[in-house]
Image (cartoon, helix red, strand yellow):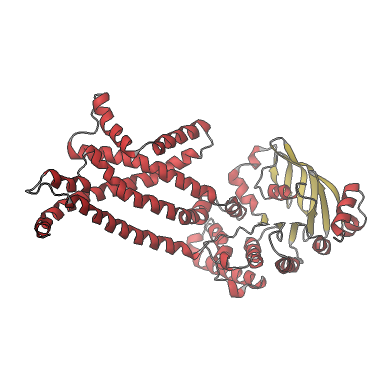
Amino acid sequence: MAILEVNNLAKSFGNTKVLKDISFSLEKGNVLSVLGSSGSGKTTLLRCLNFLETADHGTIRVRDELLFDADDARTTREREIRRKRLHFGLVFQSFNLFPQYTALQNVMLPCQLLAKEEENYKVRKKQMFAEIAANAHDLLKTMGLAEREGYYPHQLSGGQQQRVAIARALAMKPDILCFDEPTSALDPELTGEVLRVIRDLKGGDRTMIIVTHEMAFARNISDRIIFMHDGYIEETGTPEQVFDHPRSERAKAFFSKSLEEI
Amino acid sequence: MALIMEQMPIVLRSLNVGFLQTLKLFIVTLIGALPLGLVISFGSMSKVSPLRWLTRFVIWVVRGTPLMIQLLIIYYFPGLVLKKPIWGGGEAGRFLAASVSFILNYACYFAEIYRGGIQSISKGQTEAGLVLGMTRGQIFFRVTLLQMIKRIVPPISNEIITLVKDTSLARIIALQEIIWAGQAFLKGSQGISGAIWPLFFTAVYYLLFSGLLTIILGGLERKLDYFK
């Protein structure tokens, strides 16, 4: 069963059509990489899924629930959208950790704020916070950051900051975790350390969408690839199909260029 | 020198009274201008363009003309031109007019500092909060507010130190602040006349008070130094 179903998504900024007609679905537990040159609409697609942008057309369904329908005003209200965002997690290119909080606090804060909305918050506060703290410790440990819990973001390397950001996104237990060029702000050494962490997240029923320019990584980790060009899905399939036997001319040109030795 | 020592107790008593008025104007201005500045800064960033342009026009006029002129117009215009003396008479009336002038003037400067602080916070902070399920209110109070405060403390401190000395401009409408009190001994007061030193001596008050503020504001700045 598809965990995510996107139909006819379109988005314009002023007169520029950035997404033209995007439809795809994603199986639970699969990893999807979205490739394409800059300006092809990859990031906008992720931002529409996370409701940081409101699509002009189309629908978004998660677990068969209609989260968003551009033609239905009831699904586009800010108040309801906040809850719907929680189906998705997003790891940013620029980390966006909160600088005044330690690594551990960064991971815990959103969960603590959300816990306040639970019915029996006042009675169970202590227990809830203990669970949140335990979960945050575990996640940071998984990210190899057990020793860095008490550090502030400016005291961490870019790779460490991005791993905290991944832990923070995971703490919210999203159905689908999205990565927006998670290593583009990092040097090659730190890139490797972050990519390894993402690779290790694969497995079980964790569903991920990764926008990246790391071709080898995308090929190895992905169950499916989407190649975007000019706001359309130009080519889609398994990594073998898309990388080795691309059908469209544009995909052929893109992949031959990206694999070229310089 | 002996004469000065003799005059000292009388002069100090008088300067203390004047300084109290200076201090009152300083505190009232801060209490009024710090929050009013926030309102004005929201106006200058409003999506409603008439409101935005009006606010920016007011900021331009207030920052573009001397505070002394503003004091004179605000104090004298209602009574002398409109024949409606809204400030009331005496020292209380002068203090009220001076407070209004200072609050309006400083609020406009603070507004521009706030605007800079708010606009300097990267959009990514808000977006991160949104995707983590926070409300706009939570994002403001738990994420961006402290970052803004950290950025505006140094320029606000600067304005506050300037305000200490700007209060002396209220002398122009005869508010009985410390300059007025020092000057009184020049013309003659409490048996002392022709003495210029009390006027010069007021500088010590300003210096000590701004020194104290520098220490307090520096402490606040260091307190926020733990993050970048």
The x and y percentages for residue A162 are 65, 63
x 50%, y 47%: residue: B116
Seen from the viewer's position, the closer of residues A221 and B121 is B121
Q: At x 59% / y 72%, what residue is drawn? A: A148
Q: Position of residue A82 (x, y in %)?
A: 60, 49
Placement of the C terminus of chain A among the 4 image quadrants: bottom right
Q: Quadrant of residue A143?
A: bottom right
Q: Residue at x 46, y 54 (%)?
A: B149
**Of the pair A188 and A56, the residue shown nearer to us:** A188
**Residue at the bottom extreme of this rendering:** A147
Q: Quadrant of residue B40?
A: top left
- Front-most of residues B44 and A105: B44
Residue B188 locus on image (x, y percent): 10, 45
Work out which residue is located at the far top of the displayed protein and give it. B82
* Residue A84 visible within the image: yes
Looking at the image, which is closer to me, A182 or A79?
A182
Please give left or right for residue B207 compared with residue A199 in the image.
left
Q: Would you place residue B101 above or below residue A167 in this image? A: above
Q: Is residue B118 left or right of residue A39?
A: left
Q: Count every numbered label the image shows and give the total.
A: 0
Q: Is residue A1 visible?
A: no
Quadrant for the N terminus of chain A, please: bottom right
Is A184 situated left or right of B198 in this image? right
Q: Position of residue A208 (x, y in %)?
A: 74, 59
Is B40 rendered above or below residue A214? above
Q: Which residue sits furthest left? A: B191
Judge whether B31 appears above or below A128 on screen: above
